[in-house]
Image: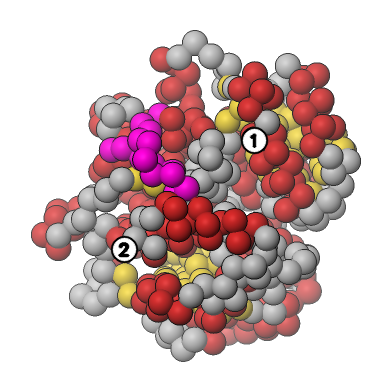
Amino acid sequence: MKYVSTRDNSKEYSFEEVFIKGLADDGGLYVPTSLKKFSSDELSDLKNLNYKDLSTEIINLFTSDFISKKDLSELIEKSYSTFREKEVIKISNLGDLKLLELFHGPTLAFKDVAMQFIGNLYEYYLSKNDKKINIVVATSGDTGAAAIDAIRGKSNLNIFVLHPNNRISPVQRKLMTTVEDENVFNIAIDGNFDDCQNIVKQMFSDLDFSNSINMSGVNSINWARIIAQAVYYFYTYFKLDSDKQISFSVPTGNFGDVFAGYLAKEMGLPIDKLIVATNENDILHRAISKGDYVSKKVKETLSPSMDIQLASNFERLIYYVNNSNSGITSDIMKKVKNNEYKIEKSNLDIIQKDFISESCDENEILEIIKQHFDKSSVILDPHTAVGVGAANKLNFSDCVVLSTAHPCKFPAATDKAINKHEELPKELQYVHSKEENFQLLKNDTDAVKNFVKNKL
Ligand SMILES: *Cc1c(COP(=O)(O)O)cnc(C)c1O
């Protein structure tokens, strides 16, 4: 499988380049040049596979020039042996809705599903290349913990994680800052998530700097993450054994998880609608419902992992909607940068065939949590509650809601809604009492570069 950049598709790249670099030098995102489209017979053949074997089948379509199917299968086995559920994910009922529980990995959010895989993919790469790699990543809370758990203790790899100081939940922070491995560095930035993400982008685009330290990125634009996430859409469809198309409601921030659903649909999985569920940071809801892609100031909400304005992965959708035209995509991304992009009617019509959107404000989130606790004693995390709320508001009564985090990660939200919170699983309770270790830095790219250089 070959890949191109969304901003210049004249040059082809291998999976290895796509995985290690994350972002193309021209600022674009990598996309495959073609996609396997499964027939319904071919889908039936996959139907009875367990999660790990299904992962191998799907991911192998994208990685076969990098890793053999046999090695991939072993790598996936190892990656998912860290999960508390044998089948990695779990489907449960919430009234008429289904919940797709994706939070049974080591750091209690769906990010583990892709990140445990990626950590081992780096190790595999380094077993063949004599290099040292420095991963630098910005987090709104969950990516960082998942990445640290996946990378800690691995040789020839360091990881630097930037989080917005005081803007993530204490449990989220402690899962990162209590890790003792010497290859893990936590940095708290005096700013918000977008500031952290900007610093990382600037570090990447300073090619002298980024090449000199073999800088690599694991944020949600990394194609390896998207393909690992597409697997659970397939798995869910097969497990539900439905004879009609199904819809998914996806709590959305950077548009990575829901884009994985779009990928599954493009590969022939009978998905009806993908519901893009946002919190009060509703740029994607405004974009998908009426073409308004103008960013506003980030608001801090009870669902902090979705407190994002510009959703990086949306660029991939723009590229596909414009018939894989990288010139047009490039022009649109310039407009996005100047915050003056409106989605044209013809493009919007195409987007709305696959996507529908809704947003939930803080009170609605609290109300959803309370309602389901009163009715069935289930405690929903605030991100999942956004997905449930969006499905309700759109009257999608029998869709699958992606449950993206364990409620114990966000006690502030559930305390506020129902005066109750769930405790961390036993094996993670140590984080409450363990010493934290992180460096507070100004919202300044040079300060972060210097910090990194000093540690190497
Ligand atoms: C990251 C995250 C999201 C948003 O996912 P995207 O891929 O960025 O759209 C939603 N919920 C939780 C709990 C998350 O950690």
Viewer-side label of 1, 2? 1
Q: Is residue 7 magenta?
A: yes
Residue 205's disc is: 1
Label 2 neighbour load within 10 Å: few <14, some 14-19, many 20+: many
Q: Which residues are magenta?
A: 1-16
Q: Amino acid at mark 2?
A: Lys
Q: Is residue 242 magenta?
A: no
**Quarter of the N terminus within the rendering:** top left
Pick whichever, 309 or 398, lies toward us: 309
Residue 381, relative to residue 389: is it above or below? above
Q: Earlier in the sequence, mark 1 or mark 2?
A: 1
For the residues labelled 1 and 2, the Cα–Cα distance comes to 33 Å
Q: Residue 117 appears at what percent x and percent y?
A: 45, 37
Label 2 belongs to which residue? Answer: 265
Secondary structure of residue under mark 2: helix
Q: Residue 65 appears at what percent x and percent y?
A: 28, 29
Residue 140's disc is: none
Q: Is residue 203 left or right of residue 395?
A: right
Q: Is residue 420 left or right of residue 117?
A: right
Residue at image point 69% right, 52% down: 140
